Amino acid sequence: MLEIKNLHARVEDKEILKGINLTVNAGEVHAIMGPNGSGKSTLASVIAGKSGYEVTEGTVELDGKDVLELNPEDRAAEGIFLAFQYPVEIPGVTNTYFLRAALNNIRKHRGVPELSMTEFMKHIKSKVQLMEMENSLLSRSVNEGFSGGEKKRNEIFQMAVLEPRLAILDETDSGLDIDALKTVANGVNTLRSPERGILVVTHYQRLLNYIVPDFVHILMEGRIVKSGGKELAFELEEKGYGFIEEELASKA
Amino acid sequence: MIDLKAETHSLLANFELLKGLLSTYGPEAWQALRERAFRSYSEFGIPTLKDEEFKYISLRALEEGRFKPAYGATVDRYQVEQTTLGSVDAITVVFVNGEYAPELSSAHALPAGVFIGSLKDGLGIYEEEVLAKLGTIANLKGKLGSSNDERFVDLNTAYLSEGALVYLPSGVSLERPIHLLYLTSANHGPLVSHPRTLVILGENSDAKLLETYLGMEGVYFTNAVTEVSMGPNAILEHTKIQLEQADSIHIANISVHQAEQSMYTSNNIAFGGKIARNDINVWLDGEHTETWLNGASVGLDHQVIDNHTRIDHAKPNCNSFEVYKAILGDHAAGVFNGKIFVYEDAQKTDAKQTNQAILLSNTASINTKPQLEIFADDVKCTHGATVGQLREESMFYLRSRGIPKAEAQALLVFAFAAEVLAKVTIPGVREILEKLLFEKLELAQQAS
């Protein structure tokens, strides 16, 4: 489904991604782990189409379609969703209005009828319950005055509403207490399905206790240096990123 | 600038014409008031760009326009209801071209002692109170600052005649909002009107006031003055909406006098006019007052929208909060000047001022100037101004959810101003304003 080949990307003069190769098939959950500055968030941003990154080499394809050619809204319409590390506050736009505009634009792009307000409210009702959100959050401005936990919860709620093909979670666990973490993980797990791929970007193994990945990749200095099953995450937690460095050094 | 050239401009010439008629109106003391104001105005005349307080707003159109004194026009109830704000559920007092229109105003049973109607009718009941307040609030005499400019207040006072009076005695809390609706229909050539509003709120009274300037037709000049006197503990939500015609000039001076523990909220919304200037001066003359000045303006085409605000913290322990926002497209020009004076006496003042502008085109501009003069040492005063395009990260957030660029942009611009419109709590009004904003931004989009 998602096919990344030899991806190189830079911010201004600094090369951050130095040849990423990654394949995510439908139904799989992949975790990308790595120390600070390894390029995890850059990878997530490049896939979603954030400006400020220059792709110098390589390709990103979703179901055979060249993603890098598309602007962010078309990527979203093709089914890419990024749960932000730092969700943005948008005063003056209510959550409901925002989400309905998003969903209907995606539906329009796919050639399915847009949802009326009543149909939309019906669609989101179960998702509100799933994320254990207060109904009042719907009529509040997007993320404005939300606590850190509420913001992250709102990201997964949006994901549940938009039902993407590929969901990328960028450090969704940062700043969450254990209860919020469980709610967020529960939301993500409910969205696991044979048609959907999920990419979890995280520094710590903590989140992976609740969202158990099928594959774990270690990203260091812009390259995936090691891949494995979920046990790799535990090993990393136990030994720290240092052991990978040693391993790499011994190979060299 | 003294203007005594052969072609004396119409604003002066009209006075000779109307002098006799004006003298028959109101108490005798007003004749002297008018004469004094006229002399004071004549001394300076129409401001030019050399006048500090009018640096960014060209008023040459005032000099060139041959404005005739306004007189009423035939407008029926149906026409009023068809206007955007004509059917707000409120105690409504309507003026057409500055003239009171009782047949268009709504009669409501009011609590004992409350008066809401024309100045003329109000004088019959509260002459003493009116005489004590009128002209004393819109007055900067003895206050700080060297560049005080009151010439348009003087011009209004020179032509003092018809106007509105709102009077609430002590302890009255008015449930239903008040709507003063100033309509202008200049269908017989350019005209000038000088609406005058006096609001007197007794101790512990509470009201919501909507002051609307709505153009129906033609080229004209509205020169409004509103004076608000708030007793101790009084509460007022004062929303002014300016929807003048595209070729009109609108100049308004709002002056507020707050006694101790009173709470004043101003929502100043400006969408209309070719040249629009609004001054709000708030005098905090008692401790523990609270003041909110919210402003939203949208300018397109060649509109000039100039907002001047001034808060005089004259007593200790007062809080003031100010947020002014402008959206400017095409060749529109915005001006914001925010003065805050903290007097020597006014310890523990807390004043916050923010001014933000979004420019939709390369040819739109804003001049913004915070002006804080602080003479006390134990105060908190902050100000901030941002001018710019939309935030990149907000744009990306919306687009990453599937909202196309143009729609995301429109949504963010709308939201920017909608935040201010949300401060208006009179039922139905916020929705009307949002609709107007939406329509105006659609025009902006078509133009770009």
Image (cartoon, coloured by chain):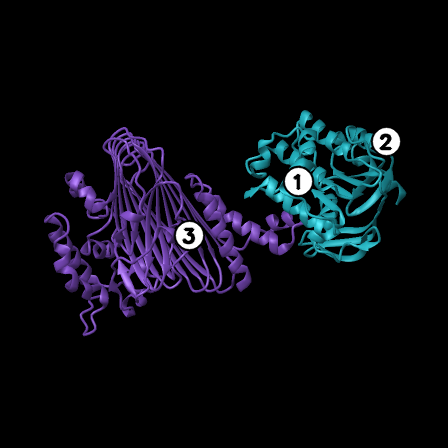
Chain colours: A cyan, B purple
Name the residue carrying label 3. Answer: B82
Disc 1 residue crowd, few under 14, some 14–19, many 20+, Cα 10 Å: some
- Coordinates of residue A233 in the picture (x, y in percent): 82, 33
Q: Which quarter of the rendering shows the C terminus of chain A?
A: top right
Q: Looking at the picture, which amino acid does disc 2 mark?
A: Glu
Q: Is residue B47 left or right of residue B440?
A: left
Q: Looking at the picture, which amino acid does disc 1 mark?
A: Phe
Name the residue carrying label 2. Answer: A231
Residue at horizontal 14 percent and vertical 39 percent from the top: B128
Are marks 1 and 2 in one subunit? yes
In this rendering, which labeled residue sits more in front, label 1 or label 2? 1
Mark 2 element type: helix
Are marks 3 and 2 in one subunit? no
**Disc on res. A120:** 1
- Which one is in front, A42 or B332? B332
Are marks 3 and 1 in one subunit? no
Asked whether residue B155 is in view, the answer is yes
The chain that hosts pointer 3 is B
Residue at horizontal 22 percent and vertical 48 percent from the top: B139
Quarter of the image where one finds residue B272 = bottom left
Quarter of the image where one finds residue A37 = top right
- Which one is in front, A92 or B188? B188
- Coordinates of residue B50 in the picture (x, y in percent): 29, 64
Q: Earlier in the sequence, mark 1 or mark 2?
A: 1
- Coordinates of residue A107 in the picture (x, y in percent): 71, 48
The chain that hosts pointer 1 is A
